[in-house]
Amino acid sequence: MEYTISQLAKLAGISTRTLRYYDEINLLKPKRINSSGYRIYGQEEVNRLQQILFFRELDVNIETIISIMNDPNYDSIKALENHLIQLRNKRSRLDRLIESVKKTIAHEKGEMMMSNEEKFEAFKEKLIEENEQKYGEEIRQKYGENVVSKSNEKFRNMSKEDYERFVQLGDEILKLLAKAYEIGDPTSPLAQELAAKHKQWLTFTWPSYSKEAHRGLAEMYVADERFKAYYDQKVTGRTEFLRDAIIHYLENNS
Amino acid sequence: MEYTISQLAKLAGISTRTLRYYDEINLLKPKRINSSGYRIYGQEEVNRLQQILFFRELDVNIETIISIMNDPNYDSIKALENHLIQLRNKRSRLDRLIESVKKTIAHEKGEMMMSNEEKFEAFKEKLIEENEQKYGEEIRQKYGENVVSKSNEKFRNMSKEDYERFVQLGDEILKLLAKAYEIGDPTSPLAQELAAKHKQWLTFTWPSYSKEAHRGLAEMYVADERFKAYYDQKVTGRTEFLRDAIIHYLENNS
DNA sequence: CATAAAGGTTGACGTAACGTGAAGGTCAAT
DNA sequence: ATTGACCTTCACGTTACGTCAACCTTTATG
């Protein structure tokens, strides 16, 4: 099957100018030029054009497309598999944007709080992905996966991180408490680690930390049956153990 | 809240050049210019910028954004609802592209036939709209919204939301305290609202709530100078006031 | 207290990926 | 022989900023 320039343009849904431009920059040369100087494209060019459009779809700039596709090591199947990943990323970003719009609507209607940071959260993640798409493709083809994903982590939202650490700390405390209680000694290293974590946990939510308040809270835990219910989930005595560990900790750390 | 140009740029994840450009073309003017000629942006400008970025996300050209947003009939909620539709269209186009890549991979591996027309089908936007209208819901159910990832998303949003409400509550408490203290009566409705908020704030981080613990904490606030430093930020006596309000609250609510 | 670093300002030219004529040759059908 | 659809090569225009340069302000530091 052979195509003139406008036939191919129509097939692919692009302009003839674009095809001439791709010719000019040596991204997509016609299969041959006929006797009157017309560009004629063949099956190979059709396939190559499709690949080009996939890259373009992912906002890879043309210079990069050229260098990737002209590389003798270029593997079209690997490239396509890479596209799949990128397209899915794009889609999940769209999902986030959709959620963001919904939230903004609710916010405008006064139904919901939305911080200024949150207002741009979904866009910012776009930044990461655009960076991904600009350099990710190239880097990934050359150095493989994990270099890329590591550098992305930097951009993560701080306050969310904080919250997650906070929740996780709460979890760790429960588990540590179970373990340390097994040992039985509130002055054991494990029990002291427990107390330290508990202090950390407190500093997340208390405006300021003081030994007295910490001690007071520990006593309160024991006195209040609801706290006991929480800490004693399986084995009774754990709340008292926690208190003792905290008191020992407070007495032995400046 | 006021922002300098780079603070706003950082918040929104765009460049300062972009903000200067938006100023130049009268798309987003700073709230005011300070004595040294610096651009200062306020809350209204933050909101407007978010709206601008939504339009930009949908590839609306700037001239159009200007004319839309400067229209006296501009309705931001309607615009947002429109964005939702557009974003969903974009997503279903992405879904088609993903299917197309999968098919192309199979085709390249010789596992499947693919016509030249089919190769470019997904790139074209018209088809998408037709498909949206024909199969809209069905497609979305099948390919669009991965149920698992979506519910994960919601969970993430929830916990994030919780965190922000928590932080904001802390803020509100400080402001309420200032106001209620002006009135001077710990039994006043405002002071009681304060106590209720304080309870709410506690339930965010305490595994369970009890009156005894709440009261204990209120006493502790007064006893500990660090807490006092926090609550008495400008005027001394506020911590005691807070305690009294809480105690009254606890005694008069079941 | 000087000075460097960081962040602000206004020009003004650069850029990517084509769009948009102009001026003219080619081809199938009337 | 003419019309109109398609092709060619210049060559300049466009959008939404990027990127200096030259200079002023504010904040941090030896």
Image (spheres, coloured by chain):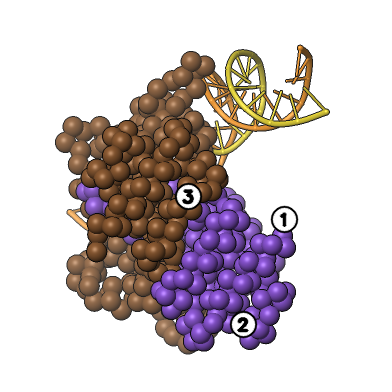
Chain colours: A purple, B brown, C orange, D yellow
Going by the numbered disc 3, the residue's amino acid type is: Tyr
User: Would residue B150 be visible to someone looking at this image?
Assistant: yes
Q: Nearer the viewer, residue B173 or C12?
A: B173
In this view of the protein, which residue sits in the foreground, D6 or B18? Answer: B18
What residue sits 24% from the left and 52% below the top?
Answer: A111
> On screen, B45 above or below B206?
above
**Residue A111, disc:** none
| Horizontal side of residue B242 vs A50, given as left or right | left
Query: Can you give x and y, in whole percent of width and height, for residue B17 in the image?
Result: 51, 33
User: In the image, what residue occupies the spot 72% across and 76% down?
Assistant: A188
Instruction: Name above or below for residue A110 compared with residue A231.
Output: above
Q: Foreground: B124 or A141?
A: A141
* Kind of element beneath mark 2: helix
What chain is tagged by disc 2?
A
Q: Which chain does the residue under circle 1 lie in?
A: A
Residue labelled with disc 1: A254
Q: Is residue A240 positioned above or below B110 on the image? A: above
Tell me, for residue A181, which label it has, or none: 2
Residue type, label 1:
Ser
The residue closer to the viewer here, B113 or A225, is A225
Give the mark, 1 or 2, whose residue is nearer the N terminus: 2
Circle 1 packing at 10 Å, graded few (<14), some (14-19), many (20+), is few
Circle 3 — which element?
helix
Q: Are marks 2 and 3 in contact (CB under 8 Å)?
A: no
Q: Residue at x 52, y 40 (%)?
A: B229
Instruction: Please name the residue that numbered disc 3 is placed on.
Output: B221
